[in-house]
Image: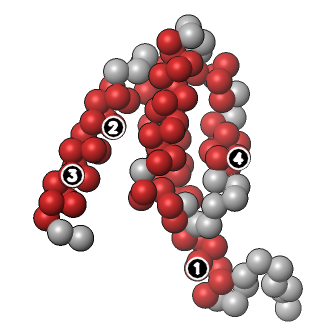
Protein backbone atom coordinates (compact mmCIF):
# COMPACT_ATOMS: atom_id res chain seq x y z
CA UNK A 1 0.00 0.00 0.00
CA UNK A 2 1.49 3.26 -1.12
CA UNK A 3 1.17 6.73 0.36
CA UNK A 4 -1.42 7.68 -2.28
CA UNK A 5 -3.57 4.70 -1.23
CA UNK A 6 -3.38 5.81 2.39
CA UNK A 7 -4.32 9.39 1.49
CA UNK A 8 -7.19 8.20 -0.70
CA UNK A 9 -8.40 5.88 2.06
CA UNK A 10 -8.43 8.75 4.56
CA UNK A 11 -10.39 10.94 2.14
CA UNK A 12 -12.95 8.19 1.63
CA UNK A 13 -13.27 7.60 5.38
CA UNK A 14 -13.77 11.33 6.05
CA UNK A 15 -16.47 11.46 3.37
CA UNK A 16 -18.11 8.41 4.96
CA UNK A 17 -18.03 10.02 8.43
CA UNK A 18 -19.55 13.21 6.97
CA UNK A 19 -22.43 11.15 5.55
CA UNK A 20 -23.02 9.55 8.94
CA UNK A 21 -23.02 12.97 10.65
CA UNK A 22 -25.63 14.18 8.15
CA UNK A 23 -28.07 11.46 9.29
CA UNK A 24 -30.76 12.23 11.89
CA UNK A 25 -29.53 11.78 15.49
CA UNK A 26 -31.32 8.46 16.09
CA UNK A 27 -29.79 7.03 12.92
CA UNK A 28 -26.34 8.20 14.01
CA UNK A 29 -26.69 6.48 17.38
CA UNK A 30 -27.75 3.19 15.82
CA UNK A 31 -25.06 3.43 13.12
CA UNK A 32 -22.37 3.87 15.78
CA UNK A 33 -23.69 0.83 17.66
CA UNK A 34 -23.67 -1.21 14.44
CA UNK A 35 -20.14 -0.05 13.66
CA UNK A 36 -18.95 -0.91 17.18
CA UNK A 37 -20.57 -4.35 16.95
CA UNK A 38 -19.08 -5.09 13.53
CA UNK A 39 -15.62 -4.00 14.64
CA UNK A 40 -15.87 -6.47 17.53
CA UNK A 41 -17.24 -9.35 15.44
CA UNK A 42 -14.65 -8.62 12.79
CA UNK A 43 -15.91 -9.64 9.37
CA UNK A 44 -12.79 -10.00 7.24
CA UNK A 45 -14.20 -7.91 4.38
CA UNK A 46 -15.24 -5.03 6.68
CA UNK A 47 -12.00 -3.21 5.89
CA UNK A 48 -13.02 -3.02 2.23
CA UNK A 49 -15.65 -0.52 3.33
CA UNK A 50 -18.59 -1.78 1.29
CA UNK A 51 -20.74 -2.97 4.17
CA UNK A 52 -20.54 0.24 6.19
CA UNK A 53 -21.23 2.34 3.09
CA UNK A 54 -24.21 0.16 2.21
CA UNK A 55 -25.59 0.66 5.72
CA UNK A 56 -25.28 4.43 5.32
CA UNK A 57 -27.02 4.19 1.92
CA UNK A 58 -29.82 2.19 3.53
CA UNK A 59 -30.12 4.67 6.39
CA UNK A 60 -30.13 7.68 4.05
CA UNK A 61 -32.99 6.13 2.08
CA UNK A 62 -34.93 5.37 5.26
CA UNK A 63 -34.42 8.87 6.62
CA UNK A 64 -35.48 10.40 3.29
CA UNK A 65 -38.66 8.29 3.41
CA UNK A 66 -39.39 9.64 6.90
CA UNK A 67 -38.99 6.26 8.63
CA UNK A 68 -37.52 5.80 12.07
CA UNK A 69 -34.31 3.80 12.21
CA UNK A 70 -35.90 0.99 14.25
CA UNK A 71 -38.61 0.67 11.58
CA UNK A 72 -35.81 -0.27 9.18
CA UNK A 73 -33.74 -2.62 11.30
CA UNK A 74 -36.05 -3.78 14.08
CA UNK A 75 -35.57 -3.53 17.83
CA UNK A 76 -32.55 -5.85 18.06
CA UNK A 77 -29.47 -4.15 16.64
CA UNK A 78 -27.26 -7.18 17.31
CA UNK A 79 -29.64 -9.49 15.43
CA UNK A 80 -29.62 -7.06 12.51
CA UNK A 81 -25.81 -7.08 12.51
CA UNK A 82 -25.64 -10.86 12.79
CA UNK A 83 -27.91 -11.15 9.78
CA UNK A 84 -25.66 -8.79 7.80
CA UNK A 85 -22.55 -10.89 8.39
CA UNK A 86 -24.05 -14.37 8.60
CA UNK A 87 -22.34 -15.49 5.38
CA UNK A 88 -19.06 -13.66 6.00
CA UNK A 89 -15.89 -15.08 7.47
CA UNK A 90 -14.81 -13.37 10.64
CA UNK A 91 -11.55 -13.13 12.49
CA UNK A 92 -13.17 -15.28 15.17
CA UNK A 93 -13.68 -18.00 12.52
CA UNK A 94 -10.02 -17.85 11.58
CA UNK A 95 -8.98 -18.07 15.22
CA UNK A 96 -11.30 -21.02 15.81
CA UNK A 97 -9.92 -22.79 12.74
CA UNK A 98 -6.35 -22.21 13.91
CA UNK A 99 -7.25 -23.99 17.13
CA UNK A 100 -8.54 -26.95 15.16
CA UNK A 101 -12.19 -26.17 15.79
CA UNK A 102 -13.27 -25.18 12.33
CA UNK A 103 -16.79 -25.56 10.95
CA UNK A 104 -18.12 -29.05 11.50
CA UNK A 105 -15.47 -29.96 14.06
CA UNK A 106 -16.53 -32.33 16.80
CA UNK A 107 -15.63 -31.47 20.37
CA UNK A 108 -13.82 -34.16 22.32
| Label 2 residue SS | helix
Res 16 label: 2
Label located before the other in sequence (3 or 1): 3
Q: Can you identify the residue that label 1 sits on?
A: 95
Q: Earlier in the sequence, mark 1 or mark 4?
A: 4
User: Where does the N terminus fall, quadrant-wise?
Assistant: bottom left
CB-based contact (under 8 Å), mark 3 and mark 1: no
Please indicate, yes or no, whether residue 33 appears anywhere in the rendered image: no
Calculate the distance from the C-alpha at mark 1 to the C-alpha at mark 2.
30 Å
Q: CA distance from mark 4 to mark 3?
A: 30 Å
Marks 2, 4: nearer the viewer: 2
40 relative position to 107: left or right: left
- Classify mark 4: helix, strand or loop: helix
Mark 1 surroundings: few (<14), some (14-19) or many (≥20) residues within 10 A: few
| Residue reaching furthest to the top | 66
Where does label 3 land, which residue?
8
Q: Is residue 61 left or right of residue 101?
A: left
SS class, disc 3 = helix
Amino acid sequence: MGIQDIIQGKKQWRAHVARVKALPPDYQIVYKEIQRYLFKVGPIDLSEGHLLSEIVDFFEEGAAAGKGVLELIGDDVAAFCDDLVKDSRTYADIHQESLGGGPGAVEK
